[in-house]
Image: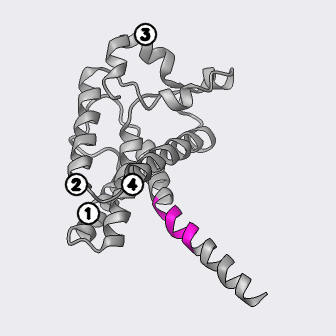
Amino acid sequence: MLQLPLLGGHALRDVWRYDRARIAAGEGWRLVTAHLVHLDEQHALLNAAGLLLLGLLFAGVARLRYWLIAAALSIVVIDAGFWWHETALAWYVGASGVLHGLMAAGTVALLRRREAIALATAVIFVGKLVWEQAVGPLPFETHGSVIVAAHAWGALGGAAAACLPAARRAVILHAISSQGRA
């Protein structure tokens, strides 16, 4: 998935990227495809490496459906955040926001399972997000212009997705207990 845009080069990147003016003109597909294209091959490889690391860290933590919902909700929240809060952002490409969403969802899953590495993962991840919002990209994030807002919005979407199963269970339990009182 992350390598597909390399086949189309810069032309595909320009057609698929989040482009505020073009989205406003009706090119809504860009809200999804922007997360599949990259600045260049190095950017794509960095995102692919990030996905691999997440796969290793969170192997067996949740089912595929969990990850797909986390990715989808991260995309929705990133796009909404860009559209309504990052109004000066003209364009964006990359999967790092979605990767941060997956990181948030995985961290919540680790915490829920009370895994030994959960607390350290959460502290480091939240620390990274706080640093980025307060100071800017981490010193080693030098490739292109890092849009740290994508990381924060993605993490928010991933965390929200991770809370969906618990919310659904609470609604079902409430409905069951309400039927018992009727």
- Whichever of callouts 4 and 1 sits on the residue coming sooner in the sequence is 1
Quadrant where the C terminus lies? bottom right
Disc 2 packing (10 Å; few <14; some 14–19; many ≥20): some
Q: CA distance from mark 3 to mark 1?
A: 38 Å
The CA distance from mark 2 to mark 4 is: 27 Å
How would you classify the magenta stretch by its main secondary structure? helix
Q: Which residue reaches farthest bottom?
A: 181
* Front one among 151 and 26: 26
Q: Secondary structure at mark 2?
A: helix
Q: Which residue is mark 4?
A: 134
Secondary structure, mark 4, is helix
Mark 2 or 3, which is nearer the eye? 2
Find out whether residue 165 is within the magenta segment.
Answer: yes
Identified by mark 4, the residue type is Ala
The residue carrying mark 3 is 11
| Tag of residue 111 | none
How far separated are the C-alphas under marks 4 and 3?
A: 34 Å
Name the residue at 26% across, 68% down. 118
Residue 121 disc label? 1
Chain part drawn in magenta: 162-169
